[in-house]
Amino acid sequence: MRILPKENNMDNQKIGRYIADKRKSKSLTQAELAARLGVTDKAVSKWERGAGCPDISLIKELAAALDITVGELLEGEDEKFVMEDETEEKEEKEEKMLLNAMNYAQTNMKVRSHRVGKVLAELFDCSLILACMICFIVDLAISRALTWSLITASSCLLAGVVITPFFLLKKEKIFAGLLTGSVLLFPYLLFIEWEANQLLGTDLHWFWPLALPITLIWLCILWAGAWIIMKTKPGVFKAAGWYCIAFAFGSAATVMISNSFANSDIVENFWNMLINCSALLAAGVICLCISSIRSR
């Protein structure tokens, strides 16, 4: 006897419909099935809609509650048999069960990771909001107005836009967060310049001659590196090596632009710049050597 071949990819929608059909065939409500499994009826509803999948620890118990096999549950349909060699049927059945279990475990792990990431993102955002509220309260208590706390709030906003997508572990959201953060960085720096002048009573304009060129240099380095890594997948050490070398040139450019803005002599900071750049270049060369050795 042999199982007819079916696709091994997990299909949450298909499994969900199968769970719903089997539940209804046993005249069970979602609440009754949930009570048997020790979960909420909302969880059962999510399974049946394909919006989620049962925890792997519940698979055996769920299959028993619906009077089906674990294989049928993972396949999302009743097993179909054709009379043939029993040994071949057994081997294929075991292989399919193993593949289905591996696919299900992988899907379940992704769901758990997304759930944990979502909780961490919410906690991070709540901590930023709490930090802003505390700063507003302290600022109002001391200054009787919102002064320096506006800088803190804008910094928290920018951090939330850039960092929160990383917790969600989705490439498109991470890319969108980085792109939004890169764009918002320029009005953010302009706001910092304006607010600092208001607080200090000065008229110092540093955005155009200082912040803008430095920001553009570092954004070019970061985005070019990210694009190269995404396209070539060079490995951790090679990527770290090229980033260190790029950071060395970025650091040198930053020092020269800063000295030009402050009208100071480049020689005064030459040795510090040389030490920093040399250290970054050395770290880059070491990482590239390690990458070369590991690839052999």
Image (spheres, rainbow, N blue to C red):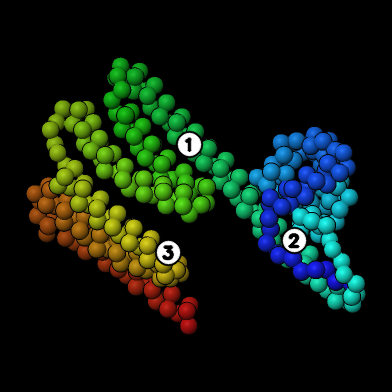
Residue on which the image places disc 3: 230
Residue ID at (39%, 49%): 178
Q: Position of residue 261 (x, y in %)?
A: 12, 48
Residue on which the image places disc 1: 125
Q: Position of residue 157 (x, y in %)?
A: 38, 36
> Under tag 3, what secondary structure?
helix
Residue on which the image places disc 2: 101
Camera-side residue of 30 and 103: 30
Query: Of the residues shown, which amino acid type is indicated by label 2?
Result: Ala
> Under tag 2, what secondary structure?
helix
Query: Cα distance, mark 3 to mark 2?
Result: 31 Å
The quadrant holding residue 38 is top right
Query: Of the residues shown, which amino acid type is indicated by label 1?
Result: Asp
Camera-side residue of 29 and 123: 29
Verify CB contact (< 8 Å) between mark 1 and mark 2.
Answer: no
Q: Position of residue 93 (x, y in %)?
A: 82, 68
Q: Position of residue 77 (x, y in %)?
A: 79, 56
Task: First in sequence, mark 3 or 2: give its number.
Answer: 2
The local crowd at label 2, few if under 14, some if 14 to 19, many if 20 or more residues have their Cα within 10 Å, is many
Camera-side residue of 56 and 22: 22
Query: Of the residues shown, which amino acid type is indicated by label 3?
Result: Met
Q: Nearer the viewer, mark 1 or mark 3?
A: 3
Q: Residue furthest bottom?
A: 296
